Amino acid sequence: QELTNKLTEQEEILKQRPDITNEKYQELLNNQEKHQEEELKPENLPTD
């Protein structure tokens, strides 16, 4: 479910920004995911 939302979002962005190629977008998406993974690492989570 979440994946389809992401794809629709991606298509919308690509329509609005024809200068961003699909490849470039995927690259950005991958970087974002990596970043999220980094944040989710236990040592990076804020401690109460």
Image: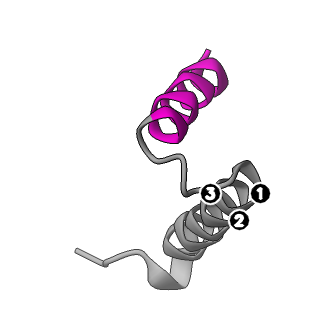
Residue position for label 1: 23
Q: Is mark 1 on a helix, strand or loop?
A: helix
Task: Point out residue 26 in the picture as x, y percentages from the top left corner.
Answer: 71, 55
Q: Which mark is residue 27?
A: 2
- Nearer to us of marks 1 and 2 is 1
Q: Which residue is drawn at 22% across and 74% down?
A: 48
The magenta region covers 1-15
Task: Point out residue 18 in the picture as x, y percentages from the top left corner.
Answer: 54, 46
Of 44 and 25, which appears nearest the observer? 25
Where is 26 relative to 7, above or below? Answer: below
Measured in 3D between alpha carbons, the distance from the residue under mark 3 to the one under mark 2, in whole angstroms, is 5 Å
Where is 6 relative to 33, above or below? Answer: above
Q: Which residue is drawn at 71% across and 65% down?
A: 27
Instruction: Say which amino acid is labelled 1.
Output: Glu
Q: Residue 29 carries which label?
A: 3
Measured in 3D between alpha carbons, the distance from the residue under mark 1 to the one under mark 3, in whole angstroms, is 10 Å
Mark 3 surroundings within 10 Å by alpha-carbon count, few (fewer than 14), some (14 through 19), many (20 or more):
some
Residue furthest out toward the front: 18
Where is 36 relative to 39, above or below? Answer: above
Q: Is the magenta stretch mostly helix, strand or loop?
A: helix
Q: Are marks 3 and 2 in contact (CB under 8 Å)?
A: yes
